[in-house]
Image (cartoon, helix red, strand yellow):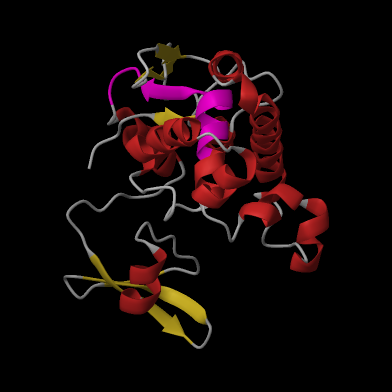
């Protein structure tokens, strides 16, 4: 796998720092990495013969108004939903551990609306023209790799928000700049990096973690464990 881009590295975001930049600042790593913003997000060659070089979602929206005037109302409502979703995600992330989920429909209606729907279902609700649905589906497929019938609406719509509102970026000196910046954070806080060391087991006692066991049999104690494996492998294979 290779890094194609990083979503949201803007320091001049209209309202506030992007989620990525907020994390880097909290870690003290924002000065260790320089992110360059993509001028053009992607180019769309439509079967009807027209081409769009996409830079900004608002510009894209007006192009679609021109090409699909009969879909103007649905496009505008879809735009409002995407914008609302992005705002809710920003508010939701710091609170999800502490929040009473019964208030979700009231406090986060856009997230609630989409959490159990597919991207196709949302497109069908707002757009009728098959060519326009194909256009949205193609943009999503080339980045997320799933057809709209199988893709989570929450994932698809949030992806639109973050790439179009917060932008796409790439580390100036290459993809390795990001892990190097995180390594410097760890070392500045008296941490140690173990290269070529595989964790084979997360050691638990009751409902608490006690540490990890490596492929050499060494046990390292810790009160908190951060796993970068997927949830399925972490909980089914390592615990």
Query: Residue 189, image x and y in percent?
Result: 46, 44
Q: Is residue 84 magenta?
A: no
| Front-lying residue, 166 or 207 | 166
The vertical placement of 71 against 96, above or below, is above
The vertical placement of 40 against 76, above or below, is above
Residue at 69 percent of width and 56 percent of height:
112
In screen coordinates, is 172 left or right of 216? right
Report the span colored magenta: 159-174
Query: Residue 20, image x and y in percent?
Result: 52, 34
**Residue 144 is at least partly visible in this image:** yes
Q: In which quarter of the image is the N terminus?
A: top left
Residue at 37 percent of width and 61 percent of height:
230
**Residue 183 is at least partly visible in this image:** no
In screen coordinates, is 37 left or right of 72? left
In screen coordinates, is 219 left or right of 167? left
Residue at 76 percent of width and 59 percent of height:
104
Query: Residue 160, image x and y in percent?
Result: 53, 33
Query: Residue 204, image x and y in percent?
Result: 43, 81
Residue 70 falls in image quadrant = top right
Q: Which residue lies furthest to the bottom in this view?
A: 206
Q: Quadrant of the C terminus?
A: bottom left
């Amino acid at each position: 796998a290779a890094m194609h881009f990083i979503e949201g590295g803007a320091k001049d975001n209209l309202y506030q720092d992007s989620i990525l930049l907020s994390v880097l600042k909290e870690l003290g790593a924002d000065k260790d990495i320089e992110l360059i913003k993509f001028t053009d997000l992607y180019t769309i060659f439509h079967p009807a013969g027209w081409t769009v070089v996409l830079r900004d979602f608002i510009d894209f929206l007006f192009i679609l108004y021109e090409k699909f005037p009969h879909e103007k109302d649905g496009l505008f409502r879809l735009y409002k939903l995407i914008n609302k979703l992005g705002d809710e995600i920003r508010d939701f992330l710091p609170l999800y551990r502490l929040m009473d989920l019964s208030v979700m429909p009231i406090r986060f209606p856009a997230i609630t609306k989409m959490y159990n729907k597919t991207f196709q279902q949302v497109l069908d609700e707002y757009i009728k023209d098959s060519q326009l649905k194909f256009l949205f589906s193609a943009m999503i497929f080339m980045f997320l790799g799933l057809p709209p019938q199988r893709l989570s609406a929450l994932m698809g719509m949030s992806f639109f928000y973050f790439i179009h509102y917060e932008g796409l970026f790439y580390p100036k000196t290459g993809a390795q700049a990001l892990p190097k910046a995180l390594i410097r954070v760890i070392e500045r806080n008296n941490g140690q990096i173990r290269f070529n060391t595989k964790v084979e087991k997360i050691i638990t006692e009751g409902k608490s973690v006690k540490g990890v066991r490596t492929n050499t049999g060494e046990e390292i104690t810790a009160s908190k464990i951060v796993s970068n494996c997927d949830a399925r492998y972490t909980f089914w294979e390592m615990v």
